[in-house]
Image (cartoon, rainbow, N blue to C red):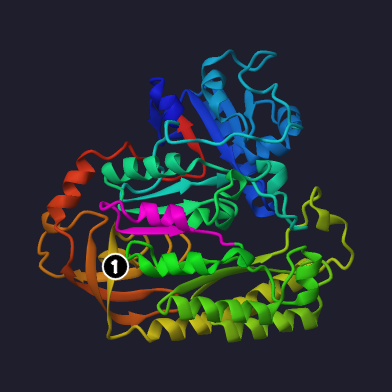
Amino acid sequence: MGILARAGHEITPRADDADVLVVNTCSFIEPARKESVETILEMAEYKKSGRAQKLIVAGCLAERYREEIREQIPEVDAVIGTDEVEKILAACEGPLRGPDAGAENGSANAAPTFLYHDLTPRMLATPRHAAYIKINEGCDHPCSFCIIPQLRGRFRSRRFESVVREARNLAAAGVREISLIGQDTTFYGEDLGLRDGLPLLLAELAKIEELRWIRFLYCYPNRITAKLLETIAAHERLVKYLDIPLQHASRSVLARMKRGSHGEAFLKMLGRIRRAIPEVSLRTSFIVGFPGETESDFRVLCDFVREAKFDWMGVFAYSDEETAESFGCEGKVDAETMEQRRYELMAIQQKISRQKLRAKIGKSFTAMLEGPSADTELVWQARLEGMAPEIDGKVYVTEICGVNEASDLPPAGAMARVEISEARDYDLIGRAAEILDAPRTIARAHAGAAPHFAARPFTILA
């Protein structure tokens, strides 16, 4: 979006207004692949009946199935893999489908090496007060179920100074919360010879006064060091939150996943984290139905979840990817059993979450106000620092103290003291008793914010 906007193209959220349609795809697991294909086919219909002259497919699905897309969906005019982001302009402005159409002749066999930096133009696809920053790309871990290295290439970190500059630029444009992301953020900087790279980066970002919250996502469990925990505990702007995808707790399943470790070791790690950061919120994710997972393995996982008491958890049914090493494993688990296990594990977590959230009733917390709720008639929604954007629960705010008219509402990104009055399974309800930030300060920041468009499963360009 940034490259096209810089070249003078107008971005539109309406497919029927567009001259060019771009579908940015995912191919990590079957549901994502299915959604990507359905969106391509939907956009192909707009090309047939609407104003659009071109349909471009980009991202991971394009990287993995370049030739299949060209052969099976003739409406597609150009295909752009994960290493060809900068070719989007040529694809949009070049001739229609043919031997010279944009980036479609790229090689699907070369390992991706693309890595954006602070001078790469970008548009925020998030609300203005929050933004993601990718600090590294690719992965070197050998997890047998994962095809990320095939889609994204080997692990590579962005330069330290580049990340800091981007964070400062975003903060100056009104962003109040940044989330650092990568396939494995805890490995950040090691390929550059930077020891304790992530703790050093976090400490530097914590100096940016305009930012209120800084978080990072996706910790590899064996890289959560004492230095990292000390850094998080020492800086107010670093949210007390860790997302650690453990994938399983059974020693035998983890061995087949090529992850190693086991539930007892994980419990010791969680205890160490909680001692270092007493108010920390912990999130994890698990895969059920991995080839060879027995009922006994699953019971080990259930017992582990009961004992670990995570604040947030995601559970995924194993996706049998044909280019993953696990595709050739014996002992495949049927779909019905996987779904039953997923449901049972989430039911265990639901009780844990409900209990943890009920303990917050009657207490006050600092929250970030995010604007009117899209899924309830209650007034606004907000998040505590232990709630990551888009993936965790919310705080529904029924009253904002001192606000009598819509014109009095504070801008999104304002910090408030919220009194909790009710808890649901994954969400909280309360009232904003006090606005902690001066609204005029946030309003000035918003006036200079970067162009922003609502996040969608596809981007439409005109």
Q: Is residue 40 magenta?
A: no
Q: Secondary structure at mark 1?
A: strand
- Residue 334 left/right relative to 243: right
- Residue 163 left/right relative to 248: left
Residue under the point 44% across and 39% down: 162
Q: Quadrant of residue 355?
A: bottom left
Q: Residues within 10 Å of mark 1 (few under 14, many from 20)?
A: many
Residue under the point 27% across and 86% down: 362
> Disc 1 designates what residue?
367
Q: Is residue 430 above or below residue 14?
A: below
Q: Nearer the viewer, residue 206 or 244?
A: 206
- Callout 1 amino acid: Ala
Q: Is residue 392 above or below residue 32?
A: below
The span shown in magenta is: 199-219
User: Which quadrant is home to the N terminus?
Assistant: top left
Q: Is residue 213 magenta?
A: yes
Taking the image as drawn, is residue 236 in sight? yes
Q: Position of residue 397 (x, y in %)?
A: 27, 69
Q: Quadrant of residue 240?
A: bottom left
Q: Position of residue 292 (x, y in %)?
A: 84, 70
Residue under the point 51% across and 52% down: 181
